[in-house]
Every structure is written in structure tokens, then in C-alpha cells.
Image (cartoon, grey):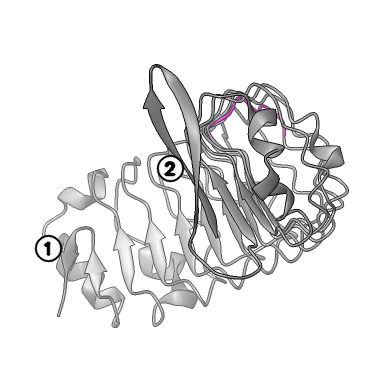
Amino acid sequence: MVVASKQVRSNFAFIIWRRVVVGREKRLCILSFLIPLPFILITVEIMLLLFFLQELVLRDNQLKKIPVVSIFKRLLVFDVSYNEILSMNGLSKVANTLKELYVSKNEVTKMEEIDHFHELQILELGSNRLRVMENLQNLTFLQELWLGQNRIRSVNLCGLKFIKKISLQSNRLTTMTGFEECVALEELYLSHNGIVTMKGLSTLVNLHVLDVASNKLTAINDIENLTQLEDLWLNDNQITSLEGIAEAVAGSKAKLTTIYLEHNPCANSPNYATTLRQIFPNIQQVDSQVFG
């Protein structure tokens, strides 16, 4: 790995290159620089990396747009998080070998120029200004999609049948529909939305983690077929009673190890934790209470 460090003398920044691994470098990190990116990229030492570079991290550099990185022909990981990027324009020139793309904490408004990343496995676009999920249809090998803290109102996954993790926390969803074809899904994070009803999850039979905390749910529904469910987060909703919960989670009664229901009216019931322990024989944690 080659790491770029920053020092300041007489109000000028300069770069110190430090070799951490002897031999062919495959990773380059340039963090928190205020000097023009093109200057960094044309240094002689960087030129020696071009052929073998697989990971390029340009986090926290006050970038306004996606930089031109087409010179890196074998890139597997590209990270431009924590910048000031307004558009994904420029990604079309990034090598189609990419497996991981991180563009979180920017000001992106549209998902675009990603349809050539046929090998992409991880896409991180959290904390942007996205309103629509789009242009995912060619990402057939995508396994993780992180879209938390955006402005998305509806789910459009374009039939991503191999995806295993999805985060849509802190968006503007009101329903759970749109996940039906994601049959390989193992973790689903939907907290801090405006979801009113649990519906549309019955096909997700491989789900291990379901987080629907901080929504507007009044009952637990449509998860009786989720036989692999281990973690269920339902805290901070409007669930009034524990009655019927055993039937609602019938398929995962033996598998479930963690359940959060605090900050619901039902959590004020007498013997609340005891009741849950009776329903779930292998439960290890109820809210913040861990059992030995």
C-alpha cells in the first residue's frame, strides 16, 4: 500500500510518499488533501503503480466531481466518499473490473453511469440526495446495496436476485413492497422511515436480520415464513400488544436470538421480557437486556 500524508510549511501542502509494502503496490490512499488532484495523479511514483493498482481511495478531498481515473485498468475498489460531488458523471470511464464503489457522503442526486459495472458486488451511496432507485438492472452480481439517508420513496431493485444486504434506513418509504424477488437477501435495514404495514417480506426466506425500527407499525405481519430470522428490530413503533406475536413469527421461533421491541406500547406490558423469553426458547437478548 502507498499512503499519502500531508504536511504544511509556509502555507503550502506537499506530499510525502511512504512505502509500507515492498514490491508491487496495489492500493493507493489520498486522504484530506487540499491540493489539486491532477497534481497528485501525475507524480512519477504514482505512474509506477498504474498497471497493478486495484484500490483507489480519494476520501475527504473536497472533490466537486468524479475524477478521471481511466488510467487504472485493473481497478477493483474506488472510494470517493466524504467529498462534495454533485453528479456521478465520469463513472462511465472507470474500469468495468470494479467490484466495490463507494460514493457516500456527497451531494449526488441521480444514480447513473453504473450500468457497465457487471462485476460490482458492493455499491455504497448513503448520505446523498437521491430520490429514485434506478439503473441497477445490469448489476446482476451485486451483493450489498447501501442507500441510507437519502430521499427515496419507493423501492426498485430491478430483479437483483443475488443481493444479500440492503440498507434503506432514513429515507421516505411508506411500504415494504419491492423486495419480493430478492430471494437471496440475508440482511434488510429499513429503520427510520414511515412504513405503516409489514407486507411484502414473505418470499425472503433467507433473511437473517430485519430492522424496521422507528417506523409507524402497529402490528407484526408477513414474516411467519422467515425460518432463518435471527435478529428482529421493531423498537420505536406503535405496536400495542404482544398478543399474536407467537403466530406472527412462527417460522423463526426456534432460530430468533435477538428481538428489540422497546419504545412500543406493548413493552409496557407486565412481564414483557418474560413473555418474550417464553415465546422464543433460544432468545439471548431482549432490547438491551442480554441473557446468559
Residue on which disc 2 sits: 217
**Residue 105 x, y percent position in the rendering:** 52, 32
Number of the label disc, if any, that sits on residue 263: none
Residue on which disc 1 sits: 271
**Disc 2 or 1, which lies upstream in sequence?**
2
User: Hey, what amino acid is under mark 2?
Assistant: Leu
Q: For the residue labelled by badge 1, is the local secondary structure a helix, a strand or a loop?
A: loop
Residue 109 vertical position relative to residue 26 in the rendered view, above or below: above
Residue 201 belongs to the span the image colors magenta: no
In terms of image quadrants, where is residue 126? top right
**Residue 147 x, y percent position in the rendering:** 59, 41
In terms of image quadrants, where is residue 155? top right
**Residue placed most toward the observer, 160 or 17:** 17
Q: Which residues are magenta?
A: 127-132
Residue at position x 38%, y 24% in the image: 9
Residue 259 vertical position relative to residue 46 in the rendered view, above or below: below
Left or right: 19 in relation to 257: right
Residue at position x 31%, y 42% in the image: 236
